[in-house]
Image: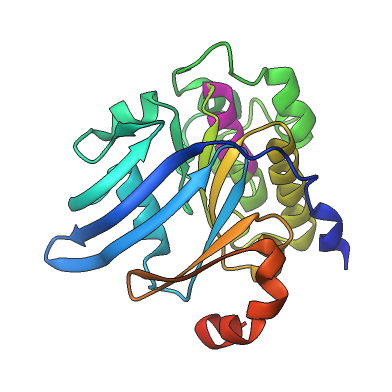
Amino acid sequence: MAEAALAPTPAAVGRTVLSVKGLQAWYNESHILHGVDLDVREGEVVTLLGRNGAGKTTTLKAIMGIVGKRTGSVTFGGKELIDLSIDRIARLGVAFCPEERAIFASLTVKENLFLPPQIDKSGAMSVERIFSLFPNLSERLASGGGKLSGGEQQMLAIARILRTGSRFLMLDEPTEGLAPVIIQQIGRTVAELKREGFTILLVEQNFRFASTLADRFFVMEDGRIIDAFASSELAGRMDRLHEALGV
């Protein structure tokens, strides 16, 4: 019941900022995505649902350009990304927080936090504001990244993005392997970011967690989108979701 309190206050949803059409992706000779279509509007949380191996993480990586080959169309703010490099996509304001978190073990928390360049200083979250969201980090600034708990590493991975000024976040399994109290803290943070106008594309196996936060859902199976619906339709879709996800 505690997770129900994580639900964000609805924010104004604006124009489409990310549009994915006919997205195909390969790892070497393995064809993973087969014509994915989805969109994300400014100020909303959109969740990708699906069983393991459905193509959810690959979708995020293909948007970011972290796959061997991709075709189709991915536009962000009206700009086509399909032929751009990872660093150019990042400089446009697309931020990807991978499941493995990518914290540098040999660097301190402070060094990890300040490592990525700011792409929009005017929109960058202040360190003071970051510490208000993640007070644990302010107490661990001198600690090595490899000495953090899984929850602290996840906080640092998100905090690092917020300091860059990116307003569009792709979060891949942010609650994976975390204790319930940390999951609740991550949920409160995502809800707060939504209230502040951030736009979030979320991949999450914890359906209960995702259901308290998302405005819309896309369901994936075998590298394709097989269903899409708003949070207001969730109750009426549960039987189908049980079948598709085993939840």
- The answer to whether residue 231 is left or right of residue 76 is right
- Residue found at x 73% / y 42%: 189
Colour basis = rainbow
- Judged from this view, the residue extending furthest toward the left is 29
Q: How far across and down, in percent of the image, does residue 76 sit?
A: 38, 35
Q: Quadrant of residue 19?
A: top left
Q: Which one is in front, 58 or 82? A: 82
Q: How far across and down, in percent of the image, does residue 165 sit?
A: 54, 22
Q: How far across and down, in percent of the image, does residue 25 sit?
A: 23, 58
Q: How far across and down, in percent of the image, does residue 90 sit?
A: 38, 30
- Residue found at x 19% / y 60%: 26
- The answer to whether residue 109 is left or right of residue 29 is right
Q: Quadrant of the C terminus?
A: bottom right
Q: Quadrant of the N terminus?
A: bottom right
Q: Quadrant of residue 78?
A: top left
- Judged from this view, the residue extending furthest toward the top is 122
Magenta stretch bounds: 155-164
- Residue found at x 59% / y 18%: 124
Q: Is residue 18 above or below residue 175?
A: above
Magenta run includes residue 119: no
- The answer to whether residue 35 is left or right of residue 166 is left
- Disc tally is 0
Q: Is residue 215 above or below residue 192?
A: below
Q: Is residue 85 above or below residue 111?
A: below
- Residue found at x 45% / y 43%: 102
Q: Which SS does the magenta portion mostly show?
A: helix
